[in-house]
Every structure is written in structure tokens, then in C-alpha cells.
Amino acid sequence: MIKAKAVGSSTRRRSVRGPGILVAALAIVASACAPGASVAPSATTVSSAPSSSSAPSTSSAPSASAVAAGPSCGTAPVVLNGYFETGFDLPFKLSAEFTKQFPNVTWNISQDQFANLMSSTPRLLAGDNPPDLIRLPTIVSLVKDNLLKNLDSYATAFGWDKWPASELSQDRVAADGTRGSGSLYAAGLNYSLTGVFYNKKEAAQIGMTQPPTTLAAFEDLLAKAKAANLQPIMAWNASASGGGLAFPLQQLMAALGSTQPINDWIFQKAGATIDTPTNLAAAQHLQQWISAGYFNKDTNATEYTDANARFGKGEGVFMFNGDWQDAAYDTAAPGNVGFFIFPSATDGGPVAAMSAPLTYGIPAKAKNADCAAFFLNWVATNAAARQVDVTVGGSNPGGPTDLTIPPAAAGSIINDTLAAGGAVAKSNGAMDFIANSTGTIFAKGWTPELQKMVGGKETPDGLLKAVQAEYLKELAP
Amino acid sequence: MDDSSLLQSSHRTNVATELRTRPSRRVRSSNVVGWLFVVPALVMYAAFVLLPLVLTVQYSLYHWDGIGPSQWVGLKNYVTVLTDPDLLGVILNAFKLIVFFTLLPVSLGLVVASIMRRVATGRFGTMARTILFLPQIIPLVAAGIAWKWVLSTSGVVNQILSAIGLGGVTRAWLGDFDFALPAVGIIGAWVLIGLCTILLLTGMSKIDPALYESARIDGAGAVREFRSITLPGLRQEIGVCITVTVIAALASFDIVYVATGGGPGLATTVPGLDIYQLAFAGREVGLASALAVVLFILVLACVLPIQRLARGDET
């Protein structure tokens, strides 16, 4: 026993030196250069503007003929590398239609979940073999690292600058790193819209014949639903999907205040704050809804897909969601789901909605940038592509105002959401999502704070102050 | 002294030196061979454990988004991490998990293992061991998803509670501020109890049966047997169990990530989850690395004393 121990300790003593030296050597190697420092020079050489070789001629007027002469996919075989989001058919259907019209272009498509896209995109774009076209969760930090191609010259060549400015503003990044203005770094395959979905049968049961036109009328309906023993609102608020109560909260913010300060906050404009008097009123309304029992009791444990499935089965008179869910509701409850824009506080007041482009960008190092840009232009302007956009995506295809929006199938909710989009555009009420202001504001700000509010552990004032503090912490240099 | 004798003596010294050096040379060459055997593993260990460890410490001293240029900030990341008002609660959550990840599996494991040693022999014993160990071979993510169903509003737990007339206490367990952390802890206990039981059972088979026999002759009951023979005999195995499970609690990530994502609020947020969010959602590689280093030190500070205690008596 004693002998064995002696041997053991002597070998231990001898072996210590090996790994010790190894660690020291690794430390020297590691400390020789700062992380990322070697990447920086090569990244900065990829200048923000498209390289001269691929830059479309900006001198030609952006007329129809100029488009034909502008950047294109040529006639030689091209393989476009796409990186799409799993679970959404739209880009796959669009790429198939594109190949049908331009047979020289074939696709090599990879796909990933949104959360994975979020964490892997920077490395993917910085690598040697980036895709030509990619679904982008966020763009500001990627622009800062020079990973995205500046699309300004494409916008001029294709005439995107003649489109309604609000369509592309969310994909613009200014030199100071704020979003909403500046150079264009991505474009939308279509433009989503949020509002309130309702179960037609249950709505009729509580006497709703017309969509409510004021916030008070909507709250009256909620009370009636509660009194009728129906589930007034179906909502998701579990961490895995992120706090879905951010949807009603933001709709309330826009109903009680103006969209401008909300967008400024999302776009990280200097001095912007979410802690405003009207936003406080909005948070107070939300808290009243919670304490009145309008939301499903298990909302803090309910995930996005579960909430939708339950709403489709009739649990919930109302549901705050976006038009990307149209097709699913059409399938789950054909003809029984309707949609209205969240009403303003005053009758006839301006209406607002969260509306965001389904953002796709072209990596700075993309090998077929011209062809990818041509595809983005084609999606917004080609009749067949716009039809796919509406039927499959359920959202407004955007593009120039002189093109009509293709119709959806009769009886589909898509018709309701497309019509509602017009009303929002008229009152210039489009906002980005408050969950998108910074990379982690949703996970570390809104979601935990909204969950606390549901659990009775946070006040409306505390909610806004905590989120603002998290916002400032994340923006601190 | 003539030439031949000189030659002879020199030869003799040569032989002598050769005799003296030969064993040491043999030791040296066996040393080299030993290293050769270790090199492949060592290279992998260095590349995938030591290098990342050193790099993490290095990154923790920089402000870096993972791609662009980095900026030396010294210990600023550590100041930020350690002054975060949420940090204490998050670390406290990890320590609360120790109750479920360590205390429950080890104590229950001891009870189950001693019962199995006494009653479950033969085919029944093998079957029991296999079933207990099963959670260990199921991917944690799959286990987390399955448990999420079990604990959901319409899940099995609530169905049983309603069936026995306890409908009043049903709730969405993973969305409840008071019960989410214990619920996550139960999942961890379910995973780890099999591992502990098997480890302890193996340790028990090592204890000389004669000890039990003589104890029984002396009139010792099951409890006395357990306290005086089983427990002392299992000191090292218990040490291993506690070490492994404490690390699992403090460095937990997968079960929490899948079951609750850290919610509701920060009720189940653990340091591992914070590190993940900082690094991959916030792209704050420096801050994430600093927190990882803090967690690393915390784990060491907890595990080293446990190791010392477990070895304790032998020195």
C-alpha cells in the first residue's frame, strides 16, 4: 500500500513538468496577438462600397431599359449559394421560380434555425466561402465588421430609390452605426405586418360584429370574453420563444403615443429612451390586462408554436401575431380566423403596426453579388415572384408603388392582412420590433421583465426602467 | 603496473560504467516510449482543452465582438461581470441546483444501492440497474423536451394531480417563479441518480462481504451495517459522485436551456446560460470569457475541497 503510493507520487511529480511547459508555450503563442486583430486588416480591405468590378453603371438612368443592362445573372451557368431560414417555404419557392425563368442559375441552398443563424452568421460571412444571399437576423454589427455588401449602387441601378422610403429604411445603416438611414445593406423578400387575429365564432359570441375602432372598444371586448368564460387572449411568453407579450405592449405603445420615438429607440438614435410617459401608460394597460386574467394562465411557459396551435383549435378569442402566420391559420381553422389592425386610442386616430422586411443581404465576399442583387430586384418586381410572395409568404411583396399587389385565394386571411397594410401605410404607422433594438435586448431585457410582470414581480415603471438600463448597458462602448 | 593490467582495469571501469548507465538509459528510453503513447491524447487535450482555456483567459482581457478588431481593456470585463446586480442571483441559482443535482441523487443513490445489494440479485438486479442507468444514455436535450411535456399545463404531472383531487395545485411548473428551479432540479436529479447508484453499487461490491457477515453475527441491523460498513467503505465513490454532480450543477446549461431558457424572469438563469447569451447573442466575447473564467474558478473552489475531504483519511 505504502509502496504503491510512493510510486504514484513520484510519477505525478515527474509528469507535472510536461503539461506545465505546454501551458506556458500555449500562453506565449496565444498572447502573441490580440484576438481578431489579424482579421481586421483583411476585413477593412473589403471596402463598404461594392468593388469597382462589380459596381453597376450608375450613370444610366434607372429606367426599365437600364435595368436590363444593369447587373444580372448573365447567360453562363451560375450556382447561387443561398443560406435560408428553416421552416419558411418562401425563399425556397422563390428560388425554384427564379430557376424556371433563368435556367442558367441553379441553387446550392443551406438552411438553419433562426437562433442558429443569429449566432453563426458573423463567422459564416467572415469565412472564405460565404453564401451569395443570406437571411439576416440583424445587420448593424455585421455592417460594423464590414461583412455585408453596400447595396447603394444596386439601389440606384435598379431604381429601388423610387420605392416608398419606409420599405428599405430598416435595412439602412448610417456611418455612426444607427439604423433607419444611411447606406442600404439588405432588402426584404416581403414586408410583414402585425395586428390582432380573432376567432370569428367566439367573437360573434361576445357580440363583436365589427373590428373595434378604439382601444376602449377592444378592452370592452376583452372584458366580455372574460365574462363569457372564454380565453380572451392567447399569448406565448416562454423564454424559448422570447416574450410574446412584447407584441401587445408595442401595439399599446403606438396606440397611446407616436411611432417616431419608438423607431428612434429601435434604431439606436442618440438619447433615445423607451421610458416615456405614453409608454408607461401602455405598460399600465398591459398590467391591467394581466391582472384581469386576459392572458392564458400558463403564458410564461407557453412557446410560440404551442400558442398558435391552441389558438387554431379555438383557445383564445384574440391573438397578437403577424401575417406570416396567415397560411397556418388558414389550414388550422379555415374561414374562422379574421384579422384587424390594432385600434388607436381615439376613434379615427392613426393606426400602427410592427412591420419588418424579411431581410436578406449579400455578403461582402459573395462571389455572385450581381446575380444575388438581380434576384432581390426580381422578387420585388416580377409578377410571378410577387404572386409567390403573397400566396406562400402571406405578406406584402413591396417593390414599386405602381405594381398592384397580387390577390390571394378567396376566403384567405391573407386578403385581410394585405388590406390592413394599406391602412397602416396611410397613417405612416410602420414600426420595427422593440425586440430588435439590440442583439440581446429581447433575451436579457424584454423577456425576463415581461415574465416578471406576468408573475406579479414587476411594475410598469420598473419594466421600462429595467429595459432601458439593459439597453444602455448593451450600447455602452 | 603493466600495459595489460592497465588495459584490464580500464576495461573493468568501462564495464562498470556500462553497468551503471544501462538501467538509467533503459529508464530514459521507456520514458520516451511512454511519452509517445501519451502524445496523441495530449495533442488532442492541448488543442481542444488547454488552448481554449488559455484563449478564454486571453479573450477575457479584451473588448471583442468575435470578428472585428479587438481592444485591450485589462480587467474591466471582470469588473463589469462582478458588479452586475443580477450576477449574485444567477450564481445563487446554480448553488440551489446543487441540492437537486447532488444531494438528492447521492443520498437516494446510497439508499437504492444498498437496497439493491441486499434484495435485488440475479436477473431482477440487472434489470433494475439498467433501468436506473437509462437516463444517462438519453441525450439531455431529448430528456429536457420530454420533461417539458411532462411538466406542462396539460402534462402528466398535472393530469395525475387532477386525478387524485389536487386540481387546485396544478400549474405550468416551468413557468412558475417558485417552482421552475425545483422542476429543473428534478430533471437533473432524474438524470444523475442512475449514475450515482451504479457508481455506489460498484463500490459496494468491493467491500469485503465478511465484514457484513461478522456484523450480522454481532447483531447489527441494516441501518447499523449501512452506517458502520457501507458508508466508510464508499468514501471515495461518494467523493466522485459529489464532485461530478456539483460540477454538473454549477456548470449546468443544456437542461436549463431546453426546459426553461432561464425563465421565468431570471428564476432559472445559471452562469452557463449567461455566458452563452453574452457570447452568441450579444457577441460580447470578452465579457462572456470573463464570466467563464469566474465560473471556472468558482467550480474549482467548490470541487477541490470536496476532493480533499474524499481522500482525507488515507494520508
Image (cartoon, coloured by chain):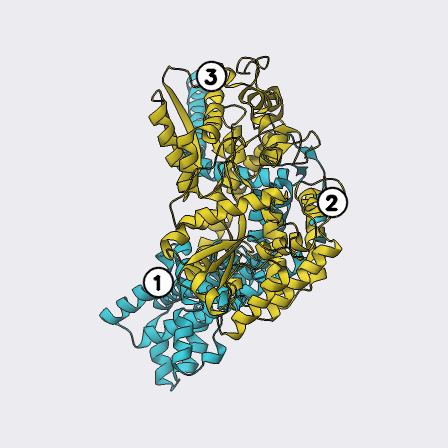
Chain colours: A yellow, B cyan
Write down the residue under mark 2: A272
Along the viewing direction, whichever of B42 and A274 lies nearer the viewer: A274
Along the viewing direction, whichever of A224 and A33 lies nearer the viewer: A224
Can you tell which mark lies on residue A68? 3
Relative placement, left or right, of A200 versus A259 is left
- Quadrant for the N terminus of chain A in the image: bottom left
Q: CA distance from mark 2 to mark 1?
A: 55 Å
Residue A302 image offset from top left, x and y in percent: 48, 61
Q: In the structure shown, which secondary structural element does the residue marked by tag 1 occupy?
A: helix
| Chain ID at mark 2 | A
Identified by mark 1, the residue type is: Phe
Q: Is residue A369 above or below residue A287?
A: above
Mark 2 vs mark 3: give the one in front. Answer: 3
Question: In terms of sequence position, does the residue under pointer 2 or pointer 3 come before the other?
Answer: 3
For the point 42% across and 27% down, the residue is A81
Q: In the structure shown, which secondary structural element does the residue marked by tag 3 occupy?
A: helix
- Quadrant for the C terminus of chain A in the image: top right
Residue B305 image offset from top left, x and y in percent: 58, 60
Asked whether residue B181 appears in the rendered view, the answer is yes
Along the viewing direction, whichever of B104 and B115 lies nearer the viewer: B104
Q: CA distance from mark 3 to mark 1?
A: 67 Å
Write down the residue under mark 1: B133
For the point 34% across and 66% down, the residue is B132
